[in-house]
Image (cartoon, coloured by chain):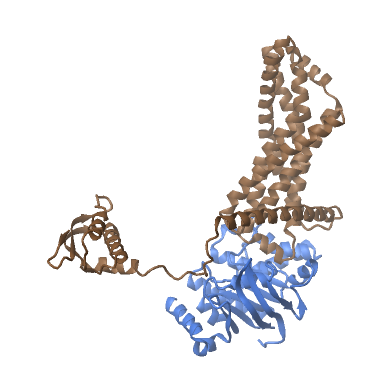
Amino acid sequence: MTVGGEVIGVRGLTMGFGDRVVIRDLDFAVRRGEVYVVMGPSGCGKTTLLRHLLGLQEPVAGEVRYGGEDFTGAPRDVRARMLRRVGVLFQGSALWTSMTLAENVALPLEQFTRLPPSTIRGLVRLKLSLVGLSGFEDYYPWELSGGMQKRAGLARAIALDPEVLFIDEPSASLDPPTARRLDALVLRLRDALGTTAVVVTHDVATILGVGTRALFLDGAEQRAIAEGPPSELRERGPASVRAFFAGGVAET
Amino acid sequence: MRRADDASLVVRLGGAWRLAGAVPPPDAVARELDGARVPRLAVDGAGLGEWDSTLVAFVAEIAEACRVREVPVDVRGLPAEVRRLLDIAQEGPAPADEPEAPAPTGIERIGARALRRQERLREAVGFVGENALALARFVSRRARFRGQDLWLLLQQSGAEALAIVALVNFLVGIILAFVGITQLRFFGAESFVADIVGIAVVRDMGALITGVVLSGRSGGAFAAQLASMKATQEIDALQTFGISPVEFLVVPRILALTAMTPFLTLFADVAGVLGGALVGTTMLNQAFAGYVRQTAAALSMGDLLGGLVKGATYGLLVALTATLRGMQAERAAARVGEAATEAVVTGIVAIIAACGVYQYVFFLFGW
């Protein structure tokens, strides 16, 4: 997988709630084709950063750009159009519980394409089979295990063939073997679909397993303190980053 | 407890220390410490039987009392397990995950609440505006939602509410007839009970009671559905697909309830009149057909249509307030119940207020 030009650019981003700043002056770029990991201990602002990248929360200062185009300052309809090139797997998978898996994957296709129902059905079957869930089209989310829900969420996230796939805590509430299988699936889909991925996680095994480059957020210092390939950060990163890797390995 | 030769205090602990048993309060030791000066305190556990955390808590209290009075404590006479627990307990609080802000003072709290009120009012106005825009998109057939969701909602807030709406209004009809007969009897005018019940039910009570029932039934459900979708990030998922949650979730609910309430009100009117008829025919020995004819004669088409318009308004208000409360809920499962409660309360207040406004307007115009 070759890594190309900038897909997401973050400039001087300061995030916070009310008067409380979580992270200040964040600068980084995600390049085409890479798996960019945002990591750090719990409560450091990883998920908050993800919400900013998706426009679910407004920054205190700074901007987010998609493919060189301003996202933060864009009007709502432009934002919606830009987000259509993005797929998200939420931490709790966030499948629409009142719909079956097939309906979950079909909804974005029905809303944003003019494809006939038979084509959409075929696409839904394809996406579900890509995540190993063929035959589960008519199941409701709550009838599935946690790992299967995550995979279904992934199928919905890739429904519109996104350029960028955001994944929030992929291994959360999964047992280690299931989490590793999900990591492998993310890499395979990245290779097969040519998407760029942004993974937010504190799971060291996931970071080392999937990350091309990683950004380490430090909640206490309220800034990013390291960026680079995960294995390099583990060996030669700042002391607190190495301690994070060491602690994570010892735990798992 | 005894004094050693060098005036230091020795606390000797013995017997069983169980949560299930009786435990001495540590105050006696503190009192002793406050008496004559104590250079040091030693705890001796040689005579201990079975023990659990009551013992540890007791020793920790003594140690704290000593720390305050700067008296050194010697716990070497206790079992190693007790000492280990004491060590952990005395480590102090774990480092907080987040830097803690100082607790707000009373005045700051009042200010914060006032600001929050203002914020919520602004949200409410914005919400109504957003709904108006989304409805315009619905009329121009550009709104994004699924037709099947609308049909399901029509069924849930309409047909499925029919039984409870009819029952409650039937009972209200009975109550109105009873009150009417007991009061009209003073003037020998109890034969007018059909008129009173008919006018009260068709003009106002049918719509009002239906609105209140729907507020508890559909309003609470709408708020809970939206709040729980917020907690599970389902609404975030819609937004990141560029689907407006207002168009997709709120507009169908508002349309469904506003459309179904007039029909339910119609059924409510019939049920209310039947309730009155039950009392009229049994207590006054009126003929059923006569009671119905008398009711019909007392009513005009304007009364009926006015009631139905009121019903539609109440349906709209219930749906608006309920979906607003659902969308305002914070992203936490615990907020689902609060959102449902607030939705029902706000909905009922809105209905009653609207009813008052209607009374005044109808009175002004002599309707």
On-image quarter of the C terminus of chain B: top right
The image position of residue B179, as x and y in percent, is 67, 19
Position above or below: B39 against B207: below
On-image quarter of the N terminus of chain B: bottom left
Residue B305 in view, yes or no: no
| Viewer-closest of B206 and B42 | B42
Q: From the viewer's perspective, is B45 left or right of A248?
A: left
The image position of residue B15, as x and y in percent, is 17, 56
What residue is drawn where x is 73% and y is 38%? B353
Q: From the viewer's perspective, is B270 left or right of B5?
A: right
Q: From the viewer's perspective, is B340 left or right of B127?
A: left
- Residue B313 is drawn in which quadrant? top right
| Viewer-closest of B127 and B141 | B127
Which residue in the rendered view is the most extreme toward the left? B5
Q: Which chain identifier belongs to the blue chain?
A: A
What residue is drawn where x is 76% and y is 66%? A119
Position above or below: B246 against B292: below
Position above or below: B205 against A235: above
Q: What's the colour of chain B in the image?
A: brown
Which residue in the rendered view is the most extreme toward the front? B36
The image position of residue A61, as x and y in percent, is 69, 74
- Residue B304 is drawn in which quadrant? top right
Residue B239 in view, yes or no: yes
- Residue B196 is drawn in which quadrant? top right
| Viewer-closest of A142 and B95 | B95
**Count of number-bearing discs:** 0
What residue is drawn where x is 21% and y is 68%? B39
